């Protein structure tokens, strides 16, 4: 992407906030939980289920973590009271992981216990390489306490992901539950792939690896070669929409889950592919970000990965490439 991507990021940053708000409306469900609930109710008709993300991440003091604790309590209430087919996505740094690890653990454990009362799963989003191991450690520690309603995200661009999958599966067996994605953070070439094809190849291999371990696979990609590979990998293992998960040892807590796998996509991105998968009977989950801090969030994503600016610009000028 290089120069073009950086140019678009620069251009977007010069745009008036109101213009950015117009674009963001497609990708962010609104400023508060009520807007997110309306969006989910509407999209339920397309056969989707959801994972809800309160926008924001790394905080500068522990008082800020309280905001996320309270807001995720409101999300849980909203899911239960509205009978939504939804779970939670949280960023561990928003709960204080980089400030006070013990406090972050306590904050996350409390949320997991509340969510478990309603059989709701909590996904720990994966942030940059500084917190890869600490995030995995939280998942392992919570499972060790008997809290099974938690899993994390692994990023296929990172070299370490192959051994992370093995290590987590060895510890958690059929309770291991992954979201596997390319990884939005552009990491140093000493620890990660940086070119398109090696990342796609790695992700496809990780899908196979997760399925072969008997773990749950949330395939988070809008990229057709990955979806196509996954469909073939499922078929080769006798897995699919109309079958029970045939793999041995899949004893995990699978409330609200598909038969060993699901497809996950971001709100506003490639709805046509998502609807096609859903129509074919696959479980499809939409990532629903909402919150007051939509502008800062959008700008940070652009800074981290100029590809995002390119995708967004492409969907404005070539809407047929990316249906809502
Ligand atoms: P690719 O980037 O090649 O996109 C394929 C096509 O999809 C593009 O051509 C474009 O049409 C469309 N597209 C993709 N992204 C778009 C966007 N942002 N806006 C508009 N169009 C877009 N990463 C991470 O590091 N940690 C995490 O926890 C998560 N969590 C997560 C959850 C879910 C549900 C998804 C779908 C993705 C993530 N990601 C993530 C992001 C992920 O790592 C990756 O950066 C994006 O999904 C883009 O990669 P694709 O595989 O979709 O392919």
Image (cartoon, grey):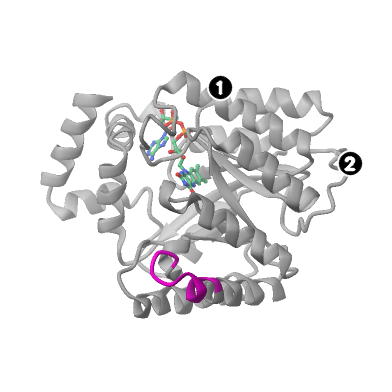
What's the distance in space between the residues labelled 2 and 1, CA to CA?
Answer: 26 Å
Mark 2 surroundings: few (<14), some (14-19) or many (≥20) residues within 10 A: few
Please name the residue shown 28% across and 35% down the image: 306
Residue 86 magenta-highlighted? no
Left or right: where 62 falls relative to 143: left
Tell me which image quadrant ligand 1 sits in. Answer: top left
Please name the residue shown 40% across and 31% down the image: 190
Q: Where 238 sits versus 143, above or below?
A: above
Residue tagged 1: 201
> Residue 260, how many percent across, how many down?
76, 43
- Judging depth in this view, the residue of 18 and 227 nearest the camera is 227
- Judging depth in this view, the residue of 316 and 214 nearest the camera is 214
Magenta stretch?
97-105
Residue tagged 2: 248
- Judging depth in this view, the residue of 165 and 112 nearest the camera is 165
Left or right: where 3 falls relative to 239: left
Work out whether residue 291 can be spotted.
yes
> Residue 16, how many percent across, how many down?
12, 51
| Quarter that holds the N terminus | top left
Please name the residue shown 72% across and 38% down the image: 281
Residue 98 magenta-highlighted? yes
| Quarter that holds the C terminus | top left
Left or right: where 141 falls relative to 146: left
Q: Residue furthest top?
A: 197
Q: Quadrant of residue 207?
A: top right
Q: Quadrant of residue 214?
A: top right
> Residue 51, how many percent across, how many down?
55, 56
């Amino acid at each position: 992407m290089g120069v073009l991507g950086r140019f678009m990021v620069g251009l977007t940053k010069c745009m008036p906030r109101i213009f950015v708000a117009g674009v963001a409306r497609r990708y962010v469900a609104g400023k508060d939980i009520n807007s997110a609930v309306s969006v989910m109710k509407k999209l339920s008709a397309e056969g989707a289920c959801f994972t809800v993300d309160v926008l924001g991440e790394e905080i500068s003091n522990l008082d800020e973590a309280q905001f996320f604790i309270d807001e995720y309590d409101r999300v849980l209430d909203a899911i239960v009271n509205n009978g939504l087919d939804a779970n939670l996505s949280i960023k561990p740094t928003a709960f204080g992981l980089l400030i006070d690890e013990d406090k972050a653990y306590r904050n996350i454990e409390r949320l997991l216990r509340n969510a478990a009362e309603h059989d709701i799963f909590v996904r720990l989003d994966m942030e940059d390489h500084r917190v890869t191991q600490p995030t995995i450690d939280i998942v392992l520690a919570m499972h060790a306490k008997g809290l099974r309603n938690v899993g994390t995200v692994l990023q296929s661009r990172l070299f370490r992901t192959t051994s992370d999958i093995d290590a987590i599966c060895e510890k958690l067996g059929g309770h291991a539950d992954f979201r596997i994605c390319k990884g939005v953070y552009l990491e140093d070439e000493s620890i990660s792939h940086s070119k398109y094809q090696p990342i796609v190849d790695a992700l496809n291999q990780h899908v196979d690896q997760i399925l072969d371990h008997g773990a749950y696979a949330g395939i988070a990609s809008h990229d057709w070669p990955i979806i196509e590979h996954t469909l073939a990998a499922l078929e080769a293992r006798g897995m699919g929409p109309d079958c029970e998960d045939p793999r041995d040892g899949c004893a995990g807590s699978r409330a609200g889950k598909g038969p060993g796998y699901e497809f996950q996509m971001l709100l506003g991105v490639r709805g046509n592919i998502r609807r096609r998968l859903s129509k074919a009977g696959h479980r499809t989950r939409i990532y629903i970000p909402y919150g007051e801090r939509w502008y800062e969030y959008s700008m940070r994503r652009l800074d981290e990965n100029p590809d995002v600016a390119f995708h967004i610009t492409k969907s404005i000028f070539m809407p047929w490439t990316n249906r809502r």
